[in-house]
Amino acid sequence: MDIVFALITSIFYGLDIYFVRKGLLETPFPVVAAFITLTINLSIFIVLFFIFVPIDLLKLKFIYVFIAAGILAPGCARAFSYKGLETLGMSISTPIVNAESLFSVFMALMFLKEPMNLVIGAGILSVIIGIVLLSYETGQKNRKDITKKIHYRYLFYPITASIFYGVSVFLRKLGLNIVSSPILGATITLGTSWCMITIFLFTSGSAKRLFQVKKQSFIYFVMGGIATCIGWLALFHALNIGKVIIVSTIATSYSLVTLLLSYLFLRKVERLSLKIVFATILIVGGVILLSVIR
């Protein structure tokens, strides 16, 4: 079931990226987008918390690791990720953020002593090579592109998001080893992230932009928030019953979803080529390897 939950996470993460990308085309305020999606996330998980989680689990000894995870992601990481969507586009930024599995897998191998074998290694390598190819190919300038000129300094945003997401996934798994409650973990992590992004929003003077969000963009941001709620719930369940090495790699292969959505709905601002298709096949093959080995 961990594989199923991880695949669900991948699909809905991809939908979130697509919805937010659409919203940012008309309202280019990444921090505001992060605040709106996080508010939707937290609201839903607070309801789930009071329905399904015993209140006596709300103790520091059970939640401190989730607080640490929330400082990194989704709050800060999502803001950087959305900024990458605005400056680089979905087809370039998303594959780079997908590299988060490198960091979470590395930490799982080092600190959780999760096992590694040839097949798992081959699956992870296949996914990583596919992601690298996607990052390279989608970054090549097309004469027919109408997207803005890309500056290499913009790579800072998805790379930072990738690191924050990867370390945060590892910390969430660590927290679930302490208390096996996915909803508790997700609620505390989201609550911490929401507090951080809210403080930044109001101290940076960006709060006024909340009233400048166009209606269509707001709808897309809300849809992104709902999609991430489903993805998050699936991710925490996957981490609760599965290994970080497998769960993280599959869950972060959502560039497959964004690639398809780019081709179908964002052809004017995104790009598709044979090399991208080949990279997609590598990622799918890696996911299959990770899925069949138990």
Image (tube, helix red, strand yellow):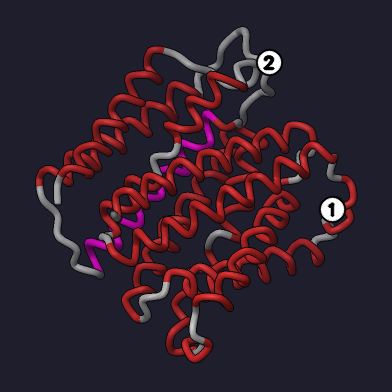
Residue type beneath disc 2: Ile
Instruction: Nearest to the eye among marks 1 and 2: give it.
Output: 1
What residue is disc 2 on? 146
In the image shown, does 114 or 37 lie closer to the viewer? 37
Q: Secondary structure at mark 2?
A: loop
What residue is disc 1 on? 210
Image coordinates of residue 273 in percent, x first then y, are 44, 13
Look at 60% across and 61% down and name the residue there.
75
Image coordinates of residue 105 in percent, x first then y, are 29, 55
Residue type beneath disc 1: Leu
Image coordinates of residue 96 in percent, x first then y, are 46, 39
The magenta segment is 91-111
Q: Which mark is residue 88?
A: none
Residue 43, above or below 65: above
Look at 49% across and 91% down and name the residue there.
56
> What is the crowding at mark 2: few (fewer than 14 residues within 10 Å), some, or many (at least 20)?
few
Pick out the residue farthest to the top.
Answer: 143
Look at 47% across and 87% down and name the residue there.
57
In the image shown, does 239 or 195 lie closer to the viewer? 239
Using the rendered view, name the quadrant where residue 42 is placed. bottom right
Query: Per the image, is 88 magenta?
Result: no
Q: Quadrant of the N terminus?
A: bottom left
Q: Secondary structure at mark 1?
A: helix
N-term-proximal mark, 1 vs 2: 2
In the image shown, does 193 or 183 lie closer to the viewer? 183
Image coordinates of residue 272 in percent, x first then y, are 48, 16
